[in-house]
Amino acid sequence: MSKSRVLVAAATLVLCCTAALAAQDATPTRKRDALFDLTLEQLMELPVTSVSRKETPLSRSAAAVAVITADDIRRLGITSLPEALRLVPGLEVARIGSHSWAIAARGFNSQFSDKLLVLLDGRILSEARFPGVYWDAQDVVLEDIERIEVIRGPGATLWGNNAVNGVINIISKTPAAAQGVLVSTAFGSEERPTTSVRYGGAIGNGITYRVHGKVANRTGLADVDGARAPDAWDARRLGARIDWTANARDSVTVQSDGYRLAGRESLTRPLLAPPFSQTLNEAFSSQSANVLGRWRRQLSSSSDLAVQAYYADSKHHEIEGTAHDHLADIELVHRFAPLAGHDVVWGAGYRRRQNLLLSTVGSYDTPNHTRHLQTAFIQDEIALVPDRFHLTLGSKLEHNSDTGLSANPSVRAVWMPQASHTVWGAVSRAVRTPDLFELGANQPIAAFLAGPTGPVIQLSLKGQPDLEPESVVAYELGYRTTPVPALTMELAAFYNRYDSLIGFVEGEPTFRLQPVPHVSQPLIASNTGAGRTVGYEASARWAPTSFWRLSPAYTYLRQPGHADLFEFDSPTHRASIVSSLTLPRQVEINAAVYRVGTLEGAGIPAYTRADLGATWRPISNLELGIWGQNLAGDRHVEFFGPRTTLLEAVKRTVVVQVTWRR
């Protein structure tokens, strides 16, 4: 038997033994977290806001939506947002390096996944050069997160551009829910260490506040031979939030956050002479600051109004160059009930984004670029049969200064034949606007010798300013049920058709004498791609006892017809099971096992990941935790980066965390 199977078997044995010991005392003395004390039926009634921009019970949402709670994050010793997202059925999470990730929903995964919208308290986190996310820059204080809502499938009717295959909405705790002092330190194989500090208080007259800071120091991963990879990094973060409940109708939120991070990264650059490529390892840095304000007014029991505005300024210095991003956004959202059985939400917004792009390995046609975006949306939820059959119709119109007007309509229906059974279906359209790289970049990517005597061929990616948005029409069908109080199950199936996908096609080659004689072969951005994805996602929560929960999940995905889109790759099969066990004497045993299938296009083999850990509260305000992660093998590669030929592996690690609250 292999070492990985022995470790997985050992982890399973530990879980079974601890469950047997726990069964001897069916009333653990530990005062558990409020969310863990809820029954599975009550968890299904948790409100989510990302599906309809109003609080809707999870069980009645007409979308494939999952919620990661603060308790889920705490129990598994999770130290970063991407690691928390591994818990979501149907979401692809793969680590590329110490500070880089590939995260996507329902296919098209890459380091800069361009069909997934990510929000933090209503503020978009995607870049303008590419609509992906710098996940290392989102190194938030995890103890401040209330929940993470993840929609698999289009969410563009409410959230707009780039919400093509999914939406991740990270919602932080209010200051009222984060009172007192918190100090948390994690250290281990990669954390050297990471420390978070938070303080929350009240001023009076309905004003509460919290301030937080975080210092992170993380080592590099490993290369395929097991040696330490040269991509260590560190980050510093400060932030604050103030909530003011002015009266029974009005509330105001003001929050601000800023960070600085620095580290090292690798980049493979083409050369016009042997060996025709060079992998560099140099320093990179990133910094950002933002401020957000929100005013809400409760007009009646069925009507409310919200206005939100924010400004963010960020700068990234990399081997490839510098990007400076200024983003200003304002939006109004109004909800009301014009007629009996109708619940309407509409809104309008404006966004201005200015970018200064300086490249050291290529150029941009418009290095100083400003994009204007005007939006308007409306959605009506119609109770055709109250508490039994609801139909939701809506659309969002967006006018982008680069690509013009686009529409994102959707039709959703939810049928609840009984209180414990929900059937839902949806047909949606969503678009993705071309990013600045696709619209105007000129970047060499490879060079090689054509034949024994030449000539030298240089391949370059060339953007085009007249690109159209990519689009998808998605068909979804889902079913949720709680057949018995101790078991909930969910199944979602989907079929997506994509048009105008942006790929790179060969242009006319030219012969150049400078800097050395060579043939320049451009690959020109073009809306020539089309494709489809089909699959299903199954998940469940089972509570064998009041103190033990199991959460299995399985995802099947096929995406034929994408051979020309070489930067995207997703496994066909993914499976996971998470165990949460609460024992007497303030002890918890928690474990997770993930199985990820082969990445066929990249030749990355399937792998199994197993995590196992324990927490203990010797006194009420002190928690100690220790976890072993990636226990199923010494190391494994999860994904590849498009900017370097260096493959990095995730190694077996240990994390110890100490958290003190008062």
Image (cartoon, helix red, strand yellow):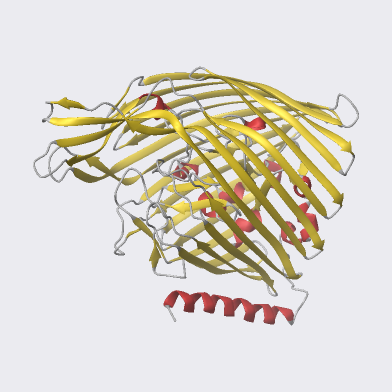
Q: Is residue 631 above or below residue 331?
A: below
Q: Is residue 3 above or below residue 255?
A: below
To which quarter of the image does residue 235 belong?
top left
Please state which of residues 517 and 302 is positioned toward the viewer in this rendering. Answer: 517
Please state which of residues 421 and 593 is positioned toward the viewer in this rendering. Answer: 421
Residue at image x 78%, y 46%? 60
Quadrant occupied by the N terminus: bottom left
- List x then y, in percent, for residue 312: 51, 28
- List x then y, in percent, for residue 440: 36, 24
User: Residue 49: in sight, yes or no?
Assistant: no
Taking the view exactly as shown, the residue that stands out farthest to the left is: 453
Quadrant occupied by the C terminus: bottom right
| 276 sits left or right of 15 in the view | left
Please state which of residues 350 and 494 is positioned toward the viewer in this rendering. Answer: 494
| 662 sits left or right of 557 in the view | right
User: Residue 601: in sight, yes or no?
Assistant: yes
Residue at image x 46%, y 70%? 632
